[in-house]
Image (cartoon, rainbow, N blue to C red):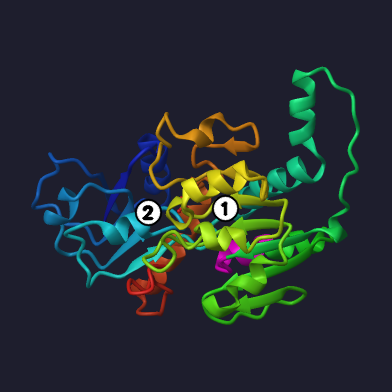
Amino acid sequence: MNILFYGQGLANDGWLEAMRTTWPDSDIQLWSAQLDTRWQADYALLWHPPVELFASQHQLKAIFNLGAGVDALLRLPGRPTEVPIIKLRNAGMDPWMFDYIHYGVLHFGRNFDHYRRQQQQKLWQPHASQAPNTRCIGVLGLGALGQTVAQRFRQLGYRVQGWSRGPKSIEGIDTYSGLEHLGAFLGRCDVLVNLLPGTEETCNLLNASRLAQLRQGTVLINAGRGTTLDPDALNHALDSGHLRGALLDVFHAEPLPSDHPLWARSDVIITPHIAAPTLIDEALQQIATDMQSLEQGLFVPHVDSAQGY
Ligand code: OXD
């Protein structure tokens, strides 16, 4: 079997070595423009591939996306639309995503934002902390990661609610679905955790009017896709004091342009898209199982390109 790898920003050597261990009998190649065009892959493992890659590969049975979000791959011109795309379904990312979001929940819930500012003024002034059961965490997007995150917060005693495009039922969690119920969902959150995928429908879903539906003092954590949030609307909602603060991992343009006002805000924490890294061993474990199922003609869940996830 021939397997192609390309991972923008990923550690090629580590991936190739682990792939050769996972598939010792396969021919594994790193894509480059110099790769002999007579060499055709059965499967491709890709993260942010260049447009030229697909021009030379004509026998792909499936593409494995080395991340949970498929927006970049779906946008790529020249992608063979008949080849199924399989994305990572958690693959060990969920504890990392949970830790990232939990950090933000604790940062604001235990008033570290206030204490950071007070430290600059050498001010010793305690603030009342909020107990988990008095805070409502709202998870926007109930895919594999969203569901796990919601359940982990529930286990810690938080009140948790979730919103998704279509109806979902998750034990112990109040769920809302459809745009017609988004306002009701937003109005009950103390912390809004956005894990929505980047699709045409979710583009700037969190705009000025939706942010205005949040309660005064809500905290926003965005670890899904940057395109789902209007950054200027967020800046304005923070300026007006309507929102208390934000933890942001993803942006419309990455890196966030250096002149963007969000960089300078003490009520915003910015991280460079690191919330849930792709883990080589766990990812290859999922992919190897999926590949085996495909070879046996069994069903493997794949991306619905019309929905965008
Ligand atoms: C992903 C990401 O999609 O890290 O997995 O952005």
Query: Which of the 4 image quarters holds residue 201?
Result: bottom left
Q: Is mark 1 within 8 Å of ligand 1?
A: yes
Which residue range is magenta in the image?
141-149
Instruction: List x then y, in percent, for residue 176.
Output: 63, 77
Q: Is residue 145 magenta?
A: yes
Give the CA separation, mark 2 to mark 1: 23 Å
Residue type beneath disc 2: Trp
Instruction: List x then y, in percent, for residue 225.
Output: 47, 54
Residue type beneath disc 1: Met
**In the picture, which quadrant includes the C terminus?**
bottom left
Query: Which of the 4 image quarters holds residue 299?
Result: bottom left
The vertical placement of 47 against 157, above or below, is above
Residue identifier under label 1 = 93
Please report whichever mark, 2 or 1, sits nearer to the chain's N-terminal start: 2
Q: Is residue 276 visible?
A: no
Q: Which mark is residue 23?
A: 2
